[in-house]
Image (tube, coloured by chain):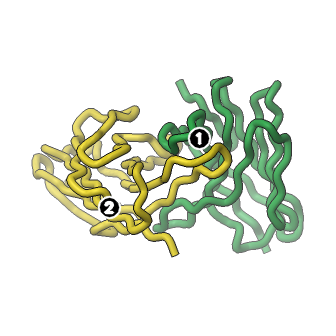
Amino acid sequence: DVKVTQSSRYLVKRTGEKVFLECVQDMDHENMFWYRQDPGLGLRLIYFSYDVKMKEKGDIPEGYSVSREKKERFSLILESASTNQTSMYLCASSAPGLAGTDTQYFGPGTRLTVL
Amino acid sequence: DQQVKQNSPSLSVQEGRISILNCDYTNSMFDYFLWYKKYPAEGPTFLISISSIKDKNEDGRFTVFLNKSAKHLSLHIVPSQPGDSAVYFCAATYDNYGQNFVFGPGTRLSVLP
């Protein structure tokens, strides 16, 4: 059974703190993604990575950075957390495939609250 | 500007009736569309997909219809069950590398017993 795990389900941090969100997948997928989900806005892509040490900015990368040192692990870093980064963070992975076979597999999400 | 739109934030349906969730897109390059279902405190899970070469795909109680000329797709759930109550996200992509997914804002479906 495919699995994407995220290090924390709930996290509370203070403004200005450095925050690390970890994601691990066991499907040997090349692609990994970080999204945030906010009411009325759906899922917005922060960053994605298509290979080890490779990263691409998504729609809302400001205030975030990422790290992918190993294929199975993709980390999201908030260098200095702010209250507007309070959100649900979702990690996903996918594999390049023939048209009609692409899908993303999501982790359970991390609910981050920044006070 | 949202490339994938779900104009109904919420929908309520009686158990046993049909649920119809709608999705519109603006980018004509999209050629593959997916629906995801999300329960509270869980990540989205893949539900059903359709390629642009088809206009219909069916999987049990779930059917997705695609109207390319109108840039519109819909998800039909028949019959609706209380366990279908969730947020449904429409997503679209245009590459074979599994990278460029664009999600809509979601529609919260409530199936009433």
Q: Going 56% across and 42% down the picture, which residue do you hit?
A: B103
Q: Residue furthest front?
A: A98
Query: In the image, is residue B49 above or below residue B92?
Result: below
Residue A52 as seen in the image, left or right of residue B4: left
Q: Residue B88: x, y in percent? A: 64, 54
State the SS at label 2.
loop
> How many C-alpha atoms fall within 10 Å of the one at disc 1: few (<14), some, or many (≥20)?
many
Q: Amino acid at mark 2?
A: Glu
- Number of marks in the rendered image: 2
Most foreground residue, A2 or A91: A2
In this picture, residue B46 sits left or right of residue A72: right
Q: Does mark 2 fall on the same chain as mark 1?
A: no
Residue type indicated by callout 1: Gly
Identify whether A99 is placed above or below B80: above
- Residue at image location 47% in from the left, 60% down from the top: A106
Identify residue for label 1.
B104
- The yellow-tinted chain is A
Q: Residues within 10 Å of mark 2 (few under 14, many from 20)?
A: many
Q: Which mark is residue B64?
A: none
> Chain coloured green: which letter?
B
Q: Based on the displayed image, in which of its 4 quarters is residue B30 positioned?
A: top right
Quarter of the picture holding the C terminus of chain B = bottom right
Of tags 1 and 2, which is closer to the observer?
Answer: 2
Percent of width and height locating residue B20: 81, 51
Mark 2 = which residue?
Answer: A72
Residue occupying image coordinates x 54% and y 38%: B102
Chain hosting mark 2: A
Residue drawn 44% across the image and 47% down it: A38
Q: Position of residue A23 (x, y in %)?
A: 31, 61
Above or below for B80 versus A51: below
Question: Where is A22 relative to B24, above or below?
Answer: below
